[in-house]
Amino acid sequence: MDDVVISIKDAVVSYREDVALQGVSLEVHRGEFVGVIGPNGAGKTTLLTVINGLGKLVQGQALALGLSVNGGNGINLRRRIGYVAQVENIDPRLPINVRETVMVGYYGRLGLFRRPTPAQWENVDRVLDMVGIAHLSHRPIGHLSGGEYQRAAIARAIVQQPEIFLLDEPTASIDERAQWEILDLIQLIHREYHMTTLFVTHDLRQLPSICQRLILMKEGRIWQQGDPESMLDKEILSQLYGVPISVPTEIARS
Amino acid sequence: MDFAILQYQFMQNAILAGLCGGVTCSIVGVFVVTMHLSFIGVCIAHAAFAGALLGVWLGFNPLIGALLFSLTSAGIIGPMADRGELDPDTSIGIVFSLMLGLAFLFMGLMPGSRTEALNLFWGSILTVSHQDLVFLGIVTVIVIGLVAIFYKEIQAVICHRQVALAVGIPATLIFYGLLFTTGLTVTASLRSIGGLLIYSLILNPAAAAYQLTYSLKRMLLIASAFGVISCWVGLAASYFMDIPSGASIVITSCIIFGLATAFSPKRKVKRWQQAQLSG
């Protein structure tokens, strides 16, 4: 049985005159945890948006979960793909609480005209408990700290029951302790649900130790890839970032 | 105070128009205020006004012109803002200035008396016709029905549009639907409230409700109540003090907004945030 869930061939993405991805090819297998690192502007986020159908291909093709991301499959595809972006600035007066925000994860699969059931609300409460913010469930979403907000975003993605989990710098702009807690949570979730996961970061210290493969991106291309042990090399990383880099002694705890 | 006036048909129509207009304008106001796209309401209101003036000039039903122009402007603003070629404020501003220009052009080309045009400008809730009232009533039912049916999608899109898109909600369709609903509401309320003042009735009750609650359901209810109160108090002031109704409605809604802001529990949050930043 073919267990390739993401297959990208010669993908080119451009935003007006800027080429964000230049002929990227990639295969990701079911249940794999893949780390994507590289300097700012390397095309890491664009790679994730190609997978969930929000990035438009100028050339090449991409399949996710057996569906072409180029066709009219975007909405169906995104219902099966969880996406957590970095902490955003959010209006503290926004009229939606944490529990309702997490429930949004269900809405895509529920479809139009159907309301969430009491069992689904109970599941939201269970997941909020799992990510450690059950006590904040009725708090307005804009009143959370960065770390709490990311826990809510991860809870929303779990509620979605995705087959692919995309994490775009989920620990950026939050304090050190919250970063470690979020990384622990991500690794716990991977062990529990075995979702195919792509984890993007520019900060090597934020690379989860559970990572099975590391993709190094530079200037819109996959520059190198391999197992983390071989990729986390002083010479390779210094070339990738264009400055002398010391390999972190400890990547995220398992 | 003599309440015998309530027995007259024109006053009953005005009260009903205030009820329907207050509710619909406030509901669409909740959408645009929560999305921080208040200027869209201003732009669509002026588009409806320009379209209605075209109708007056060329001799067809002004409401048809208002509907065409407001829906077209909503259909232009959405993609312009989404494509990111221009900043949303810039694209809305360009459409707004075009609509204002067209409004003045049509008014300038209009032969003879411009009374009807000025009525559309200021609105006159006291002279609203049975036909206008039926149209406003239908639009009210449509708007409330759409909110009831698509509540969960609307909540997701107005609070977290990018998240809604990422989880597979047809967020773009819902967003454009909200813009079209705004256009429809503006058209239906044009004769009673007036093209110049209607966006105040869209923004002020919703902005006041935004200061008072963190629940979208409560925000919709409070905004609707504020919208209706603005219309009815403004109507009473207009009748008893012999002042223009559109102006009195808008001033009432501004006073409600001022009071809501002064007593907003959310001000504590702002103070808390400032303390966090300075600490």
Image (spheres, grey):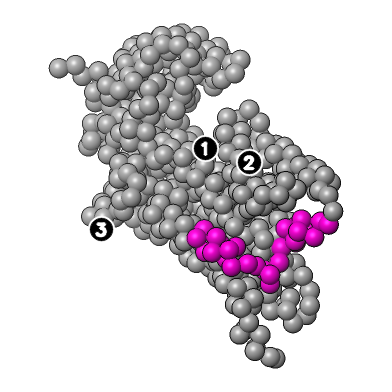
Residue found at x 61% / y 40%: B72
Q: Gap between marks 3 and 2, in whole Å?
A: 41 Å
- Neighbours of disc 1 within 10 Å: few (<14), some (14-19), many (20+): some
| Number of numbered discs overlaid on the protein picture | 3
Q: Nearer the viewer, mark 1 or mark 2?
A: 2
Give the side of residue B174 with respect to residue A76, left or right: right
A94 inside magenta stretch: no
Q: Where is mark 3, residue-wise?
A: A118
Provide the chain ID for the residue under circle 2.
B
Q: Quadrant of residue A181?
A: top left
**Marks 3, 2: nearer the viewer:** 2
Question: How far across and down, in percent of the image, does residue A113 sit?
Answer: 33, 50
Locate residue A30: give its quadrant. top left
Q: Amino acid at mark 1?
A: Ser
Q: CA distance from mark 1 to mark 3?
A: 35 Å
Vertical arrangement, residue A125 with respect to residue B103, above or below = below
Q: Quadrant of residue A40?
A: top right
Residue B113 in the image, given as x and y percentages of width and height: 83, 57
- In the image, is residue A83 above or below residue A107? above
Residue at image location 34% in from the left, 46% down from the top: A112
The residue sitting at the bottom extreme is B1
Residue placed under numbered mark 1 in the picture: A173
Of callouts 1 and 3, which one flags the residue occurring earlier in the amino acid sequence? 3
Identify the magenta region: B113-139
* Residue B134 falls left or right of residue B122: left
Residue A146: % across, % down: 48, 44
Front residue of this view, candidates B97 and A135: B97
Same chain for the residues under marks 1 and 2 in the image: no
The residue that disc 2 covers is: B73
